[in-house]
């Protein structure tokens, strides 16, 4: 009698493959890993990118608000800003209306670096979403944005002016 050959399983159990929670978690983990690897290869972390992207939309005065918007601890934000300032990517100045606060802005070098980081993130996104056509990507984004804004008000679309 010959022993039966055991073939390793190459697919997920049906229960997991049928679970949106599991699939979103698994895809999110993989996408985050790819993005982190690419950003780190460029000498930056995900939080550096978040800070630069936030400042890319304009100056910020309340570091507590910045920390909340990018989901980092306030003390961690101070370290991030210190590092970005040492690299010449951001500047902090005392706020004119409240000397206890600092205004944080991107420098020219910071804007250039943000452009490069955006290209990296866009490339990762394009590679990851390659199996989807333009309309499918739009629908996916719409659904994800709806879920995100339902569970976290920071993702709500700004009101039209």
Image (spheres, rainbow, N blue to C red):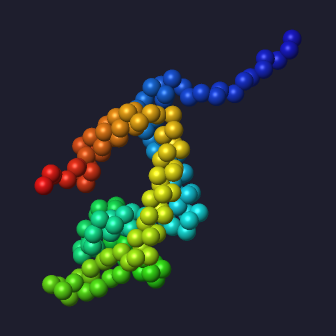
Image-quadrant location for residue 148: top left
The residue at 40%/33% (across/down) is 136
The residue at 27%/51% (across/down) is 155
Instruction: Answer left or right for 56 relative to 45.
Output: left
Q: Please indicate, yes or no, whether residue 7 appears anywhere in the rendered image.
A: yes
The residue at 49%/45% (across/down) is 126
Quadrant location of the C terminus?
A: bottom left
Quadrant location of the N terminus?
A: top right
Q: Closest to the observer: 119 or 87?
A: 119
Q: Residue furthest right?
A: 1
Q: Please indicate, yes or no, whether residue 140 appears anywhere in the rendered image.
A: no
Q: Position of residue 16 (x, y in %)?
A: 48, 29
Q: Position of residue 80 (x, y in %)?
A: 42, 74
Instruction: Answer left or right for 95 relative to 36.
Output: left
Q: Position of residue 153 (x, y in %)?
A: 22, 51
Instruction: Answer left or right for 5 relative to 152.
Output: right
The residue at 46%/69% (across/down) is 113
Q: Residue furthest top?
A: 1
Q: Closest to the observer: 90 or 146?
A: 90
Q: Closest to the observer: 92 or 127?
A: 127
């Amino acid at each position: 009698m010959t022993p039966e050959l055991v073939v390793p399983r190459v697919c997920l159990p049906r229960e997991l493959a049928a679970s949106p929670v599991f699939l979103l978690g698994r895809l999110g983990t993989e996408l985050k890993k790819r993005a982190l690897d690419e950003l780190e290869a460029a000498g930056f972390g995900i939080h550096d990118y978040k800070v630069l992207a936030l400042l890319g939309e304009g100056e910020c005065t309340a570091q507590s608000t910045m920390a909340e918007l990018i989901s980092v601890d306030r003390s961690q934000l101070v370290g991030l800003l210190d590092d970005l300032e040492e690299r010449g990517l951001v500047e902090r100045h005392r706020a004119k209306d409240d000397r206890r606060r600092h205004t944080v802005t991107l420098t020219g070098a910071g804007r250039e670096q943000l452009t490069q980081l955006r290209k990296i993130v866009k490339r990762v996104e394009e590679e990851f979403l390659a199996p989807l056509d333009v309309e499918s990507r739009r629908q996916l984004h719409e659904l994800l944005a709806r879920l995100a804004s339902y569970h976290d008000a920071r993702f709500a679309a700004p009101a039209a002016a």
